[in-house]
Image: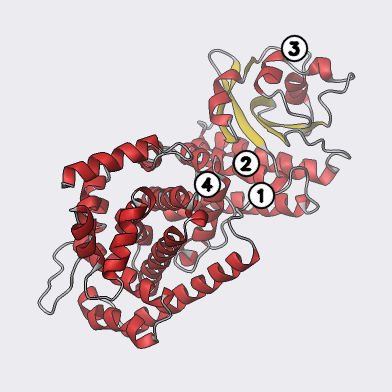
Amino acid sequence: MTKQQFLDQLWDRMAQKGDFPTLQYCIDNVFKTLNNDMSIGEMAGTVLSDFSLSQKVIRLANSAMYRSFGGDVTTVSRAIMVLGVDTITHLTLGVQVLDFFQGVAPNRPQAGRALKQAIMAGEITRALNDARGILGGEEGVVCTLMHHVSRLVVIFYFPDEWDRIAKLSADGVMSESDACREVIGISFDEIAKAAAFRWRLPTLIADGMLGRNLGDDTVLESHADWLGAVASLSSGAAASMLAEQPDEIVLGPLLAHAQRLGLEAPHVNAAIQQAGKLMTTMARSEAQESGVRSAPEEGGKRADTLMRLQHALAEVRQEGAGMTVSQLAPLVLESAMRALNFSHCFLMLLHPTTKRFGARLGFGDGMRDKLDQLSFEEGFVPDMFHFAMIAPQPLLIEDLSDKAVSHRVPRWYRDAMPDTRSVLLIPVKVRNRCVAMICGDWGTTRIAGGLTKNELAAAGELAGEIATAVLRSAPQR
């Protein structure tokens, strides 16, 4: 078939596949929702909507590559401050790509192997950046992962053709890319170029995901050239490791071109050791249970809630001293959510002109779509929100279905959050006037026994940091 015939068939098959979202949607969604115009709160909300992604973001922020910039990081909001918008965008894209292919890989051995090679190659690239002290490591990881996408789409959508490609290249006489051209009339790089154009990838990633053949006289003239060369060499090293080749074969190409890449032998050795640890971890995980994904913590209050709140308060005070209200609010909100193990958490702010409270920021499943429904007037009404406004400490309602309190639950809240059983309302007061309120719940779980006096006090102090920021920004009188 011609190149265009193959590409037309590829896009049709990807569009028709119904058991998981198309890769094009995943990529479009990343660059639509994560961009430089987003606030920390908006970006944190996007990341927190995916539990797996949020854990990976936090782990990355605590990794050796970034530890010197951030110390212990426990929230996505803090991680975004440490890593920056570009790194979060690249990390999100990488996670989306891997999650897309991992959906059906367990049922296809050849796909599983190719996916492992992509993950291993990405780890080698990340470790090379780490060892060399190069910032923006996730950019290189994404280029390395995308370098493998052309192989993966052929494996998934043209399995018969892939089997023929694998047979032709099995003895090493013919390269996979040449075999690909022989079987389907197009090379892997040409598939990659077409995919990059169709998915509207940023130019740097579109160029950096293409392989670079390094010869004795090769000169890397651009950052994209460097990214492509690292992607190619990392991929080759990952393939050799998975084939259990001796160290000299795994390390040989990387060491031979290390100087040209601006690397040194210790950088290469450290990267391969790191990838080896990952390979061992993946093998152990597969042996224990195949295809199990991380799950969020169990709902409800945790035994170490007070310690978590105290740690969150210390972190917010340390980081938030110079922040504006808009910068500090997402950090406080997410810190409260993690410390108290909320299922949903949102912040309501008082609009001084309309004298209405409205939700401006929310974390948890579906919260971004519910913010417009969450609003009430400042003027007193005998419901739980207005009682919380005048309460001396945070107000916990253990069971919203209890007849003694159910009539205090306003309709707007019940309509928006129909499954909530227990709720905590934490007022933020400035000069004895409630100007904001944090509202958190544990979903369908009832918080039997409530919160201790010290836990409620710590939650109030955490919310009080927003009041401190308001006073700090207000004109002195």
Q: Distance from label 2 to label 3 (Cα)?
A: 27 Å
Query: From mark 3 to mark 1, how far is it between C-alphas?
Result: 32 Å
Disc 4 residue type (three-letter): Ser
Q: SS at mark 3?
A: loop
Above or below, 48 relative to 408: below
Task: Bin the neighbour count of mark 4 within 10 Å (Cα to Cα): few under 14, some 14-19, many 20 and up.
Answer: many
The residue sitting at 58% across, 33% down in the picture is 362
The image position of residue 358, as x and y in percent, is 58, 21
Q: Return the residue at label 3.
A: 381
Identify the residue at image location x=35%, y=79%. Answer: 268
Q: Residue 77's mark? A: 4
Residue 34 horizontal side relative to residue 279, left or right: left
Q: Nearer the viewer, mark 2 or mark 4?
A: 4
Whether residue 32 is visible: no
Q: Earlier in the sequence, mark 3 or mark 1?
A: 1
Q: Amino acid at mark 3?
A: Val
Along the horizontal axis of the image, is 141 left or right of 425? Answer: left
Q: Position of residue 91 (x, y in %)?
A: 42, 53
Which residue in the structure is indicated by mark 2?
A: 465
Nearer the camera: disc 3 or disc 4: 4
Q: Which mark is residue 313?
A: 1
